Image (spheres, helix red, strand yellow):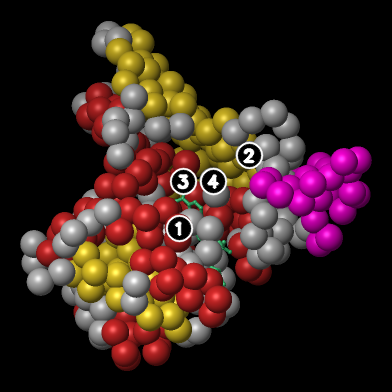
């Protein structure tokens, strides 16, 4: 019998997961919930199943085996906890929450329910990055230097608000913080500094409100951020991120280890030293983050590569970074944020 899948939040990124789910013969797309009912209805019209304006009706009426949650950072918590209490397995897009209170609460519900969960950190499924992790596994790591440069502000209306999107550290650079954990293990302390260097409310000449934005009526998040991290393995890490408009996306790492210098560009990697090589991410790597959850649930297993707790730990680094900023740049222990 096909796995019954429901979707909560059917905006931008959901379209990727809808398309990927539709490719699977062993998944039946039974329903969609979005606070903007027309978006849920559009998905139902395209893929079959029923539309709802709230997740409880979706759970009550469709009794899905699994759900795919693609809501903004502020709209998490009850969606996941209620799913867990009903034994519904879930995939959730990163970041898993906007606060540790929200994330720790869901983690408790997930543990009590024993369900399968997966967080949308798809970089962990790149074949190149899996190889880099293997190369680093038996070498002392010295530095993990990450950057996340976006050429503008993403268009969802919630993005420029701290209380809704969480700022760039929580909302986007979390990909790099999670990948740093994947490659070098957990982060013990985080010290941060942020700034706002650009006037976002000044309408630029020829402004077109599409794609990434150069203008926002309100803009209350930092547009540049720097972190210094102490990894538990002893390595030091840095993260630089910016959303100031410039020519291109530039997302990646340098990792310095004993005998090896690794360069990561997006999902691809190259390395020089006592070993040399380069690798691409491989085919369909971004789909596997979702497919693995489906495969495991169908196989009767709750084991996944990026369970909910991984999202909680990666969120703690972002929030420790902002907490450090509030404390004038003093290092903050991530362990203090985890329940
Ligand atoms: N993994 C990736 O590379 C990647 C890429 C893009 C976005 N994302 C993540 O996906 C999430 C959503 O981003 P997006 O760009 O799709 O945003 P979006 O604003 O385009 O879509 C979010 C949808 O959720 C709906 N929604 C809000 N509150 C809801 C609630 N309580 N119940 C049901 N629906 C609700 C909104 O109406 C909207 O349709 C963000 O956390 C973002 O970081 C991940």
Label 4: how many residues lie within 10 Å, few (<14), some (14-19) or many (20+)? many
**Residue 229 location, x and y as percent?**
50, 41
Residue placed at 31% from the left, 47% from the top?
A: 287
Disc 2 target residue: 150
Up/down of 76 relative to 289, above or below: below
- Return the disc, 1 or 4, that comes first in the chain's sequence: 1
Q: Which mark is residue 175?
A: 3
Magenta highlight on residue 4: no
User: In which quadrant is the N terminus drawn?
Assistant: bottom left
Q: Mark 3 CB in 8 Å range of ligand 1? A: yes
Up/down of 52 relative to 93, above or below: below
- Looking at this view, is 140 or 300 the one in front? 300
**Residue 220 location, x and y as percent?**
76, 60
Quarter of image, res 52: bottom left
- Looking at this view, is 217 or 322 the one in front? 217
Label 3: how many residues lie within 10 Å, few (<14), some (14-19) or many (20+)? many
Give the magenta-colored segment's residue range.
194-218
Disc 1 target residue: 15
Separation of residues labelled 2 and 4 (CA atoms): 10 Å
Foreground tag (2 vs 4): 2
Up/down of 187 relative to 165, above or below: above
Residue placed at 47% from the left, 41% from the top?
A: 176
- Return the disc, 2 or 3, that comes first in the chain's sequence: 2
Q: Which mark is residue 173?
A: 4
- Return the disc, 2 or 4, that comes first in the chain's sequence: 2
């Amino acid at each position: 019998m096909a796995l019954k899948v429901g979707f909560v939040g059917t905006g931008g990124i959901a379209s990727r997961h809808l398309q990927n789910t539709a490719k699977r013969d062993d998944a039946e797309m039974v329903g969609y919930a979005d606070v903007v009912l027309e978006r849920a209805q559009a998905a139902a019209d395209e893929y079959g199943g029923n539309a709802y304006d709230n997740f409880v009706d979706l759970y009550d009426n469709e009794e899905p085996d699994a759900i795919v949650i693609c809501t903004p950072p502020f709209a998490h918590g009850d969606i996941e906890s209620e799913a867990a209490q009903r034994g519904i397995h879930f995939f959730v897009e990163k970041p898993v929450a906007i606060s540790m209170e929200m994330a720790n609460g869901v983690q408790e519900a997930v543990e009590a329910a024993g369900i399968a969960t997966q967080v949308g950190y798809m970089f962990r499924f790149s074949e190149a990055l899996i190889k880099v992790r293997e190369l680093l596994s038996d070498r002392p790591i010295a530095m993990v230097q990450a950057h996340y440069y976006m050429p503008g502000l993403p268009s969802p209306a919630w993005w420029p608000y701290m209380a809704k999107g969480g700022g760039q550290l929580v909302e986007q650079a979390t990909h790099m913080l999670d990948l740093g954990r994947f490659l070098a293990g957990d982060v013990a302390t985080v010290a941060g500094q942020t700034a706002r260097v650009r006037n976002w409310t000044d309408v630029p000449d020829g402004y077109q409100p599409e794609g990434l934005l150069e203008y926002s009526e309100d803009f209350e998040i930092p547009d540049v951020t720097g972190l210094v991290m102490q990894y538990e393995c002893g390595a030091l890490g840095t993260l630089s991120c910016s959303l100031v408009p410039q020519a291109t996306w530039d997302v990646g790492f340098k990792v310095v280890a004993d005998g090896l210098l690794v360069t990561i560009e997006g999902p691809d990697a190259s390395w020089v030293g006592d070993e040399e090589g380069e690798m691409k991410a491989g085919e369909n790597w971004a789909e596997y983050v979702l497919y693995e959850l489906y495969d495991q649930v169908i196989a009767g297993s709750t084991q996944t590569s990026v369970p909910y707790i991984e999202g909680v730990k990666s969120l703690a680094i972002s929030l420790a970074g902002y907490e450090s900023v509030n404390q004038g740049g003093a290092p903050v222990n991530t362990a203090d944020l985890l329940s």
